[in-house]
Amino acid sequence: MKVEDIESFFKDLQDRICSAIESADGGAQFHEDLWQHHSGGGGRTRLIQHGGIIEKGGVNFSSVKGEVHPRLRAQMNLGDDASPQFTATGVSIVMHPRNPHVPIIHMNVRYFELDNGTCWFGGGIDLTPHYVVEEDARTFHRALKDACDKHHPGFYPRFKAWADDYFFIPHRNETRGVGGIFFDYLKPDEPGNGEGLSKARLFGFVKEIGESFAPIYTALMKKYADKPFTEQQKQWQYLRRGRYVEFNLVWDRGTKFGLETNGRTESILMSLPPQANWEYNFTPEPGSEETATLGWLRKGIIW
């Protein structure tokens, strides 16, 4: 399996997800921005704005080539004497809806390959409701578990716990949302992180996760797009978006790495919402829907 085959799948995945989101939204289309990376390769940033359901969303494809950055070299323990070249390709998605009853969602699937043959897959998908609905969270996690179980019975529990730890805001002591799955450095034929699976089988798993996005999210879009909301609920949405911004700019590993390595700023910061608010020491009313939502934002919930 060549990197070109994986790139081709990711491009097609981007096309199909954009089509599904446009169809469900019914009010806007994606604008495409083609770009080249300074070290080689490039990508297709696609943005949808001011739609019927989506206020701002992005579905990005990239395939970047070049020499491994010193920061990543140290992280991978490559040593100073090696000068490996890399190819990194993937699709990343974030959707910020207009209606506070429709959740934010994020997904990323990616592949990284060095010229010495070392390669791995990574990715994840997580849901960030402004108002947590237990039934929706359980349905979301069941869909992810079903997708994982098709490929390895150990994937879901391990990757679910990994997501709980990763999508966590330490300075707020709360999870970003209801979690999902997160995985990285899945190397073919490696007994540990890759569970000994072949490259083809790991790619099959990544494809499964990527293809789960559209049916999961379009169902939530349709379920809540027309649900009435108050100005108070809209203000709560802005506050929850603020938490999202805090995580992405302070803790998200991909955002920090992209900015530190001179990545394409507009594509990296595409994940931020069009508007977010902060209110000093805001505390919702006891017994309110807002207080109930905060009660769900913790690690280790068995959905």
Image (tube, helix red, strand yellow):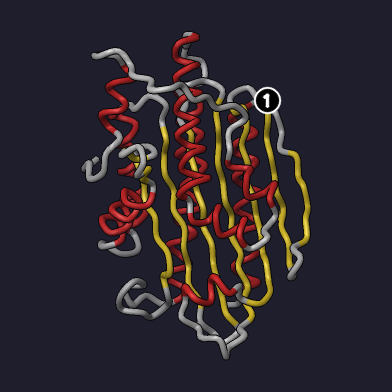
User: Can residue 9 be seen?
Assistant: no
Q: Residue furthest bottom?
A: 81
Q: Quadrant of residue 128?
A: top left
Q: Quadrant of residue 236?
A: top left
In this rendering, the answer to whether 46 lies above or below 199 is above
| Camera-nearest residue between 120 and 252 | 252
Q: Quadrant of residue 195?
A: bottom left
Q: Is residue 54 left or right of residue 219?
A: right
Q: Residue 225: image x %, image y %?
A: 51, 20
Q: Write down the residue under mark 1.
A: 50
Q: Amino acid at mark 1?
A: His
In this rendering, the answer to whether 124 lies above or below 191 is above
Q: Quadrant of the C terminus?
A: top left
In this rendering, the answer to whether 250 lies above or below 64 is above
Q: Quadrant of the N terminus?
A: bottom right
| Camera-nearest residue between 302 and 37 | 37
User: Can residue 266 be seen?
Assistant: yes
| Camera-nearest residue between 164 and 98 | 164
Q: Residue furthest front?
A: 280
Q: Residue 79: image x %, image y %?
A: 51, 86
- The residue that appears at 26% across and 62% down in the rendered structure is 154
Q: Is residue 301 left or right of residue 279?
A: left
Q: Residue 277: image x %, image y %?
A: 52, 24
Q: Residue 44: image x %, image y %?
A: 72, 53
- The residue that appears at 61% across and 83% down in the rendered structure is 84
Labels in figure, total? 1
- The residue that appears at 68% across and 60% down in the rendered structure is 262
Within 10 Å of the Cα at label 1, are there few (<14), some (14-19), or many (20+) other Cα atoms?
A: some
Secondary structure of the residue carrying tag 1 is loop
Q: Is residue 9 left or right of residue 206?
A: right
- The residue that appears at 68% across and 50% down in the rendered structure is 265
